Image (cartoon, grey):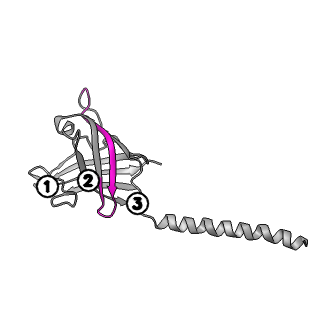
């Protein structure tokens, strides 16, 4: 073998690896964003038909929505600043499934704490329409939503906004 051939073979392998890497990055960039991850709550609002906005956990609620890769979820939210002792809060956990084509996440609730309304979720499937806006996950429930979620009388829509934790 000539020295030239020994030098060329590694270069061909490096070029092939580089091409495969670039192709995988291009495919990853085109795939839709994933709900899997930890999301810090930045807004938790109820918008009423009369125009009032209720921020039951304050202007800057504390909390996380966690969706893991095994299909489990944990959600915790509390008021900020805490005005009550104990602070107003809720939490629930279970599993989840995503219908990406419809933009719906279904929370299969196994346990919950908080007010009676939240505890009613136990053993139920809570369907939520969602979308991504950059690094933000938005759960935005409006009248006539595609998830089949029913809003209370007088409520026009609710918004739960989270930002991906990096």
Which mark is nearer the camera, 3 or 2?
Answer: 2
Contact check, label 2 and label 1, Cβ < 8 Å: no
| Residue 151 position (above or below residue 113) | below
Provide the residue designation for mark 2. 128
Residue 150 spot, x, y in % from top left:
15, 53
Q: Secondary structure at mark 3?
A: loop
Which residue reaches farthest top?
A: 85
Residue 55 spot, x, y in % from top left:
22, 45
Which mark is nearer the camera, 2 or 1?
Answer: 2
Q: Could you tell me how far apart the alpha carbons at marks 2 and 1 are, in whole angstroms?
A: 23 Å
Q: Which mark is residue 51?
A: 1
Which residue reaches farthest front?
A: 1
- Residue at screen point 60% across, 67% down: 22
Label whose residue precedes the other's in the sequence (3 or 1): 1
- Residue at screen point 37% across, 55% down: 136
Which residue reaches farthest right?
A: 2
Residue 128 spot, x, y in % from top left:
26, 53
Q: Is residue 51 left or right of residue 10?
A: left
| Residue 1 position (above or below residue 100) | below
Q: Could you tell me how far apart the alpha carbons at marks 3 and 1 are, in whole angstroms?
A: 27 Å
Provide the residue designation for mark 3. 134
Label whose residue precedes the other's in the sequence (3 or 2): 2
- Residue at screen point 32% across, 41% down: 94
How many neighbours does mark 1 have within 10 angstroms: few (below 14), some (14-19), or many (20 or more)?
few
Q: Is residue 97 magenta?
A: yes
Q: Secondary structure at mark 1?
A: loop
The number of callouts visible is 3
Main secondary-structure element of the magenta-colored stretch:
strand
Residue 139 spot, x, y in % from top left:
28, 54
Q: Which residues are magenta?
A: 85-105
Residue 79 seen anywhere in this rendered image of the structure: no
């Amino acid at each position: 073998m000539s020295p030239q051939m020994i030098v060329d073979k590694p270069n061909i392998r490096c070029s092939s690896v580089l091409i495969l890497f670039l192709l995988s990055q291009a495919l990853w960039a085109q795939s839709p964003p994933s709900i899997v991850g930890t999301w810090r709550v930045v807004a938790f609002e109820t918008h009423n038909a009369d125009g009032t906005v209720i921020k039951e956990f304050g202007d800057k609620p504390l909390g996380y929505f966690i969706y893991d890769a095994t299909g489990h979820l944990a959600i915790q939210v509390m008021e900020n600043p805490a005005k009550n002792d104990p602070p107003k809060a809720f939490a629930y956990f279970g599993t989840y499934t995503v219908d990406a084509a419809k933009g719906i996440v279904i929370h299969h609730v196994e346990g919950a704490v908080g007010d009676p309304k939240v505890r009613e979720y136990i053993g139920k499937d809570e369907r939520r329409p969602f979308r991504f806006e950059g690094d933000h996950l938005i759960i935005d429930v409006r009248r006539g939503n595609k998830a089949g979620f029913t809003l209370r009388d007088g409520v026009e829509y609710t918004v739960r906004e989270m930002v991906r934790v990096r």
